[in-house]
Amino acid sequence: MPSKSGNVSVRTEGGFLITPSTLPYAVLTEEDLVEVALDGTVLHGHRRPSSEWRLHAAIYAARPEAKALVHTHSPRATALSCARRGLPPFHYMIALAGGDDIPCSGYATFGTQELAEAAAIAIRGRRACLLANHGVVAIGSGLAGAETLAREVENLASEYLDLLQAGLEPVLLTPEEMVAVTAQFGGYGRIS
């Protein structure tokens, strides 16, 4: 488990609370969180916000329904992102991310506005995406939902990479099959 990579935020009335830069999670307390406005102004907190505050701000600006964001460097999803491949509809659980795939963004240097914009584009119409050569972003109506979705993306990436490593070409679900899955999730209590 990485000690400092990745970051988490929750939307507030004035912007969002985000984990601080460079502080190991093992020593992180509630007082270490930083409240940041969408323009990057620090509203509250004594630490420096995560270097990825722009990524969070861009996604919150583009997705008003998002109340929480989890960004990880989970190993298998990050490995897939380093191949700049998203996750196709090889498994019905892909639909938890809001569509029939989990896309991978274009590459941009971490902490930059370019990365923020690439992420906001990649997650359009979805609740999760991969960041090229970087990691994963998942959003939700709460922190628990965003975290659960980020973990599910890691699980799906692991299954997908296992298939590829075995030399098997995954059989993809059709658009019609994914529509049926989405309809089935409608009454199932999917992750939000």
Image: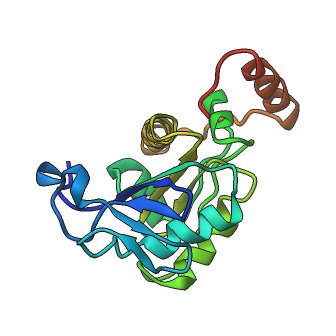
What is the quadrant of residue 57 in the picture?
bottom right
User: How many marks on residues?
Assistant: 0
Q: Give the residue at x 62% y 34%.
A: 192
Estimate the x, y position of residue 70 in percent, counting from the top left.
44, 51
Q: Give the residue at x 38% y 48%.
A: 76
What is the quadrant of residue 135 in the picture?
bottom left
Of all residues, the one furthest to the left in this rendering is 27
The residue nearer to you, when weighing 66 against 155, is: 66
Location of residue 93 with respect to 20 vertically, above or below:
above
Location of residue 37 with respect to 27 vertically, above or below:
below
Estimate the x, y position of residue 85 in percent, counting from the top left.
57, 60
The reply to whether residue 21 is visible in this rendering is: yes
The reply to whether residue 105 is visible in this rendering is: no
Determine whether, in the image, residue 65 is placed left or right of residue 130: right
Determine whether, in the image, residue 45 is placed left or right of residue 177: left
The residue nearer to you, when weighing 150 against 24, is: 24
Q: Give the residue at x 30% y 59%.
A: 33
The residue nearer to you, when weighing 103 against 113, is: 113
Estimate the x, y position of residue 147 in percent, counting from the top left.
44, 40
Indicate the colouring scheme. Answer: rainbow
Determine whether, in the image, residue 10 is placed left or right of residue 7: right
Q: Give the residue at x 64% y 34%.
A: 96
Location of residue 169 with respect to 36 vertically, above or below:
above
Determine whether, in the image, residue 67 is placed left or right of residue 162: right
Estimate the x, y position of residue 131 in percent, counting from the top left.
51, 65
Of all residues, the one furthest to the right in this rendering is 176
Location of residue 125 with respect to 178 vertically, above or below:
below
